[in-house]
Amino acid sequence: MWCLLIGVLTLASLGAACKPSVTTVSGSKAPGQVCSGAMIFQDEFDNFDFGKWKHENTLGGGGNWEFQYYNNNRTNSFVQNGRLYIRPSMTADQFGEDFLYHGTLNIQGGDPDNRCTNPNFWGCERTGTPTNIINPIKSARIHTVNTFNFRYGRLEVRAKMPAGDWLWPAIWLLPAKDTYGTWPASGEIDVMETRGNRNLMINGNNIGTQEAASTLHYGPKPGVNGFQKTHWAKKNPNGYNSDFHRYQLEWTTDYIKFSIDDAEIGRVTPGQGGFWQHGGFSAQEKNPWPPGSKMAPFDQQFYIILNLAVGGTTGYFPDIATNPTPKPWKNTSPSAMADFWKGRSGWEPTWNLKQNNGEDASLQVDYVRVWAL
């Protein structure tokens, strides 16, 4: 009887210690109980946990007509000495250069883990031509969409950014379900993104490795996006490629805050009119978000993404920017990917792929941690 009583008291005390949280979670790696302040997701990268992370497998270019081919290959994504590495490589190293111009690459494998994950923009099969070559770079994009989704909480990723011309690393979140419609109606949370160019300049301002940015994307349709009012950047004269930093998101029922190494770089606290009012959208547009939730579309569960992209034609690498070796493509060029590849004598040496297993050009992640509010 005494032992039974002790057991009841222990369970009662454990229950009392768990303060209910506003954070919600789902997925195969989500905890069964969410206690306020508790860590609800963690990866220290002692090994590559394929139970937590799934790979994108697509030629689609990430929605920005980027030049990489995302795949599941240990050349491009691996764990070593407690760190995750996402490393670019040359497609020609595997298939030969002539294949880029004349070959056909079909990535629709039969195994579930090898199937094409995004058919948009000819994402599952491409045939190379002299003006529209097959994606010349291989890289990786991993996510937790099936394993861990959360709404409200604190995210921290300790990472070191890559260096190399036209590299585009990112730590970000997308909605687990497009509750309010397709992008950007259901939102996007960019915790951190930067450019790998060491000396990419606009009007004397380094927008390469010395600048890291955080952004919220939201709006009724692709051409109507309020991100300009929720975009912040922080400078680091030493470059974010020189050391590890902690990239942080605090996402509550009242505000969203971005920080680097505990120093706030941006915050948005929408009023009662929510993000519709904050974005200042035209009355002629239809508001996709219901009344009563000022945080919509950021009132739903999102999943974590880590990736390393290359180039693209939607303006992240502006044509007006100057670089020690000029940008080899124009964003309006019909042969942008081929132009980029033809200019590799300028950018390939900046990646240092043959030194230290390409660490300079790799996105290196020490850990990913999420806490409930």
Image (cartoon, rainbow, N blue to C red):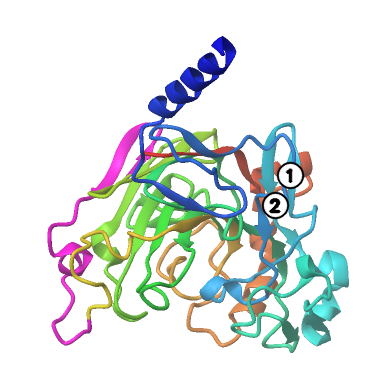
75 shown above or below 129: above
Q: Residue at x 38, y 26 (%)?
A: 16
User: Count the marks: how many?
Assistant: 2
Question: Residue 125 in the image: x percent, y percent?
Answer: 74, 84
Judge whether residue 195 can be spotted in this image: no
332 shown above or below 88: below
The answer to whether 141 appears left or right of 355 in the picture is: left
Question: Residue 228 in the image: x percent, y percent?
Answer: 27, 64
Residue situated in front as seen by the camera: 294 or 365? 294
Question: Which residue type does callout 2 highlight?
Answer: Arg
Question: Residue 83 in the image: x percent, y percent?
Answer: 67, 37
Q: Residue at x 73, y 88 (%)?
A: 130
349 shown above or below 133: above
Quadrant that contains the C terminus: top left
Q: Residue at x 39, y 78 (%)?
A: 181
Q: CA distance from mark 1 to mark 2?
A: 15 Å
Residue designated by label 2: 87
The answer to whether 70 appears left or right of 188 in the picture is: right
Quadrant that contains the N terminus: top right
Snapshot quadrant of residue 139:
bottom right
Question: Which residue type does callout 1 highlight?
Answer: Phe
Residue situated in front as seen by the camera: 116 or 231? 116
The answer to whether 267 appears left or right of 87 in the picture is: left
Q: Local crowd at mark 1 within 10 Å, few (<14), some, or many (≥20)? A: some
Instruction: Label 1: state its secondary structure.
Output: loop
Residue situated in front as seen by the camera: 145 or 15? 15
The numbered disc on residue 48 is: 1
Given contact means CB atoms under 8 Å apart, are the residues at marks 1 and 2 in contact? no
Question: Residue 57 in the image: x percent, y percent?
Answer: 70, 69
Judge whether residue 338 can be spotted in this image: yes
Is 20 in the magenta? no
The magenta region covers 258-286
